[in-house]
Image (cartoon, rainbow, N blue to C red):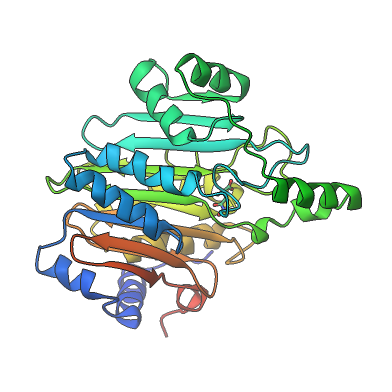
Amino acid sequence: MTKMTRRQFIGQTALAAGALNATSLIDEGAAAGRVAPMMVSTWRHGKPANEAALEVLRTGGSPLDAVEQGIWVTEADARESSVGIGGIPNADGAVQLDACIMEGPGHGAGSVAALEDILHPISVARRVMEQTPHVMLVGDGARKFALEQGFEQVELLTEERRRAWLAWSEQNAREKAENPRFSHDTVALLVLGANGDLAGGCSTSGWGYKLPGRVGDSPIIGSGLYVDNEVGAAGATGTGENVMRYCGSFMVVEYMRQGLHPRDACIETIRRIASKDPLGFNLDIHFIALDKRGRQGAAGCSTRFDYSVTTETSSEVLQGAGTELLQRTVP
Ligand code: SD4
C-alpha cells in the first residue's frame, strides 16, 4: 500500500462528502442542532426497529431500553432470514444466534454467541452485562444462563428454513457456505438519546450454513459494534470475518474521534481495510455510524447499502456510500 499524504487524505474525505451531498432533511436537522433523539440502523428492515426504539424513548425509556426493544422487532420477525427466529441455520441445521449490546454512559457491554433456542439474544446480552461480572457468554453456557434467567425455550428454525437447509444438505453444497452474500439481514441499531447519551446493539444468525460454532463479528465488541459516549457509535454488517480481523466498528469510532463526519469515518475505515486486505474492495462489509452531535452516515462495499434513520420528525431509508465512491481516488 502506498502511504496516503495528509492532503490526499483530506482530499479524499472532502470528495466523499461532496459527492454524497446532504442526504436528507435529517442532516439539515443535525446542522441546525435539532436531532436528538436519533436512531440509525442497518438495512431497510431497520426502520421498524428504529420506530419501535423511538416509541420506547417517548415513553420514558433509556437509550439502552430503546436499543433492546428496537432489536426485538427484527428478532421476532420470521421473514428476516438472518436475525432471530427464521434465521438461516448452520450446516447442522441449528440456528445459532450472536448478539451484543453496549451503553454509552457506563461503557458497559454484554454479548452472547452461538446461542440456541432463545428468541431475543439481545436481551440475554443485556443480562450478561447487568447480571454477571462478564462481557461474553457462548454456546451452551449462554443458553443455560438464559434459561436460568427465565427466558423461554423457543424453536427458532421455521419450516421454510428447515426445507431450505434440507435441500442444501442434500446437495451437500459446501461451497454455498463459502458465499454468505445470500443472507444479509443483520440488525445493528445505534441510539442517541435526547440527553446526548448513546447506546447500541447488534443481532444476527450470521453466515447461512456456517460451520457449527462459528462466531462472526456481530457479538464482538469493537467489531460488530462499538459505543463511546464521548464520541459516537458504529455498527457493522456483512462478512464478519472481514470486519473482525480489523476491529471495524472501533476503527470507525476512532476516525470520528479524529473529527471525521460519521459517513467519512465509515468510508475511511473501509478504504483502510481494503488497502491491507488481499480481497481489496471485495470485502462485503458495511458500516453505520452516529456521532454525539447527531450526525450520521454509512458506507459499504456494494453498489447499494440501505440503512435507516429515524428522528422525532422523520423516518427514512437512506443509501450509504457504495463501492464506486470508495474506490474513487484523488487525481
Ligand atoms: C456475520 N456480520 O455473522 C454477520 C452477518 C451479517 O448481514 O451481517 N449479515 O458475519
Q: Is residue 271 above or below residue 51?
A: below
Q: Is residue 221 left or right of residue 275?
A: left
Quick one: quadrant of the C terminus?
bottom left
Residue 161 percent location from the top left of the image:
71, 49
Please state the horizontal and vertical placement of residue 211, each as a whole percent of the image: 74, 39
* Residue 49, horizontal then vertical, whole percent: 38, 52
Based on the displayed image, in which of its 4 quarters is residue 38 positioned? bottom left
Is residue 107 shown left or right of residue 304? Answer: left
Quadrant (top left, top right, bottom left, bottom right) of the N terminus? bottom right
Q: Quadrant of residue 202?
A: top left
Q: Residue shown at 49%/44% (left/top)?
A: 75
Q: In the current view of this chain or complex, which residue is farthest to the bottom? A: 331
Residue 23: image x %, image y %? 30, 76
Q: Residue lying farthest right?
A: 171
Residue occupying the point 75% across, 53% down: 178
Question: Residue at the location (49% across, 34% down)?
Answer: 121
Between 73 and 202, the one lying in front of the other is 73
